[in-house]
Amino acid sequence: MTRPEVTRFLADLSKAWPDPETELVFSSPYQLLVATALAAQATDSSVNKATPALFAVAPGPKEMAALGEEAVGAYIKTIGLWRNKAKNIVALSRDLLERHNGEVPADRDALEALPGVGRKTANVILNVAYGLPAMPVDTHCYRLANRTGLARGRTVLDVENALEARIPCELLRDSHHWLILQGRYVCKARRPECWRCAATKDCLYPEKEMIAPKR
C-alpha cells in the first residue's frame, strides 16, 4: 500500500472498531503481563476463563511467587503448555520482586529479560499498560499485514518494523488493536470474510470475495 492507502485503510478499520481494547481481563500491569504470557499459543478466551480464580488468590507477584509452580499449574491446566507457563510465571514473579521492587518495568529490554517474556509480550505491556507507541505482532497482525499489503515481511520482526515505519506514531497503539480484532473476527486465516470487511477499498489481497457464501 502507498502512504495514502495506509491512512485510508486504518481510518476504515477505526470505524469498524471504534473502541479498541485488549480482550484479556486484568486489573494491573502485573496481571496483564501474566495474562499475556499465558495467551502465547492459546486464545484470550481460554486465558480469561482461568485467570479470575488465579488472580483472586495471587493478585500480585508476591502472592504468585508464594503460591509456587504446582499450585499455579492447578489453576491454568486448561491452557496449552500450562506446565512451562506455570514455571515461567512463578520465576518472573520472583524476578520482579528481586530486581524491580515488585513493579512491572516500562522498558522492553527489562521486560524481555523476564522468564517466558518475548518481544510480543513486552510490546503488549508497553502498548496496553503504559500507553507507549509499541506494535505487538501476533499471528493475526502478521497475517493481515502481509495479506492486505499494509506491511509485508518474512518474519514477525520484519512486519513489526514495517508497521512502525508506515503507521503514524500517534496511531500505533490503536492500530495494534484494530489489526488484531480485524484478523481475529473478519480477516480470518482460512477464509477471510471480505464481504463484511470495512477496509476492502485499499486492501491488496488478490482473492477478495465480496459475496457472502450461502448457508
Image (cartoon, rainbow, N blue to C red):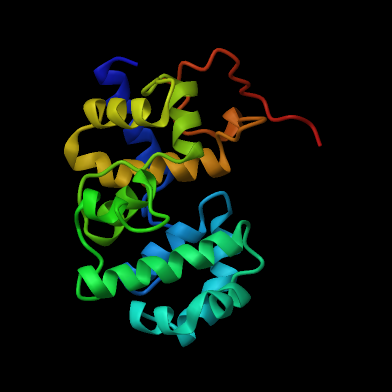
The residue that appears at 40% across and 67% down in the rendered structure is 91
User: Left or right of 204: which side holds 209?
Assistant: right
Q: Which residue is found at the position 42% from the left and 26% from the top?
A: 155
- Of all residues, the one furthest to the bottom in this rendering is 57
Query: Measured from the top left, where is residue 173 in percent x and y?
Result: 27, 46
Q: Is residue 192 above or below residue 106?
A: above
Is residue 193 visible from the viewing direction of this image?
yes
Q: Against 47, is 197 above or below?
A: above
Q: Residue at x 59, y 64 (%)?
A: 83
Q: Which residue occupies the foreground of this view, 72 or 54?
A: 72
Pinpoint residue 47: horizontal percent, then vertical percent.
Answer: 55, 64
* The N terminus - image quarter: top left
Q: Nearer the viewer, residue 186 or 104?
A: 104
**Position of 166 compared to 153: left or right?**
left
Give the position of the C terminus as an image quadrant: top right
Q: Which residue corresponds to the image point at 27% horizontal and 52% vertical from the top-left?
A: 127
Examine the image and state in which quarter residue 120 appears.
top left
Using the image, determine if residue 95 lies above or below residue 142: below
